[in-house]
Each structure stands twice: as C-alpha cells, then as structure tokens.
Image (spheres, rainbow, N blue to C red):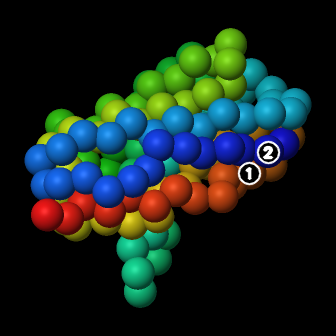
C-alpha cells in the first residue's frame, strides 16, 4: 500500500489549504484514514481521522477550523484547513490503519507553512 499526499504550501494566517491523500494497493473496507502533523522539535500528533462507516475525530486545536472527508471509492482522504494559524505550521502526514489485517501505512508528508 502506498499513500501519496499533496496540497501543502505557504499560506498567510487566516487562509485555507486543502490536503489530499490517495491510497493505492489493497486496503480492506474496515479502516481509519487520517492526518497527523509534526512541527519542528515536536512529536507527531493526530490532527483528524475518519472511520469507515462511522464518524470523525479531531484534535481540540483544529476543531471548527479543519474538516476531514473521504472518498471511499477512490481510497482518498481530504483535509480542508480553514482559518489557518502560524501554529498550524508542520509537516502533515496521511495515515491509513487497516483494521482487518492490523496494518498501518504512512504517506511521505507534505509541508504546510502559515506565515505572513
């Protein structure tokens, strides 16, 4: 399984970006797709995830600003980021957990920089 993330870049505070992550390969229908981020010198933290046939979870710091969605037919997960803040600056990684086989996959990371 390979994950290809895209959509990062430089944006001013208050701006928006949309990240995409397409998964290729064999993934069961019982999975969790999500996004993590890692700022310089900090640990990698969960930003948001979406569970197949179920709900979503968000870190408190992004609730009301970020929205995660998925297109299961395309095995693609999206992260719409609005009202971006400088503290959102990080490398964002997409993640897929295949709950049926107990496997986890990571994308290569895409850099989001929020700065004026």
Res. 116 mark: none
Residue drawn where x is 48% and y is 32% of the image: 78
Count of picture labels:
2
Calculate the distance from the C-alpha at mark 2 to the C-alpha at mark 1: 7 Å
In front: 89, or 56?
A: 89
Verify CB contact (< 8 Å) between mark 2 and mark 1.
yes
**Along the polypeptide, which appears first: circle 2 or circle 1?**
2
- In the picture, measured across the screen, residue 76 lies left or right of residue 68, that is right
| Quadrant in the picture for residue 66 | top left
Question: Can you say whether 13 is above or below 82 in the image?
Answer: below
Q: Quadrant of the C terminus?
A: bottom left
Query: Can I make out residue 49 in this image?
Result: no
| Quadrant in the picture for residue 17 | top left
Q: Which residue is mark 2?
A: 2
Residue drawn where x is 49% and y is 48% of the image: 35
Dot 1: what SS? Answer: strand
In front: 115, or 24?
A: 115
Q: Which residue is mark 1?
A: 105
Q: Residue 77: horizontal and vertical position, in percent?
A: 55, 31
Query: Can I make out residue 26 in this image?
Result: yes
Q: Quadrant of the N terminus?
A: top right
């Amino acid at each position: 399984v390979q994950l290809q993330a895209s959509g990062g870049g430089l944006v001013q505070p208050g701006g928006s970006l949309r990240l995409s992550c397409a998964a290729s390969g064999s993934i069961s229908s019982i999975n969790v797709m999500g996004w993590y981020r890692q700022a310089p010198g900090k640990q990698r933290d969960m930003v948001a995830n979406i569970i197949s046939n179920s709900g979503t979870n968000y870190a408190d710091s992004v609730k009301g600003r970020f929205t995660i969605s998925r297109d299961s037919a395309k095995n693609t997960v999206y992260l719409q980021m609005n009202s971006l803040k400088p503290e959102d600056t990080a490398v964002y990684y997409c993640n897929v957990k295949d709950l049926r086989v107990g496997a986890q996959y990571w994308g290569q990371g895409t850099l989001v920089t929020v700065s004026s």
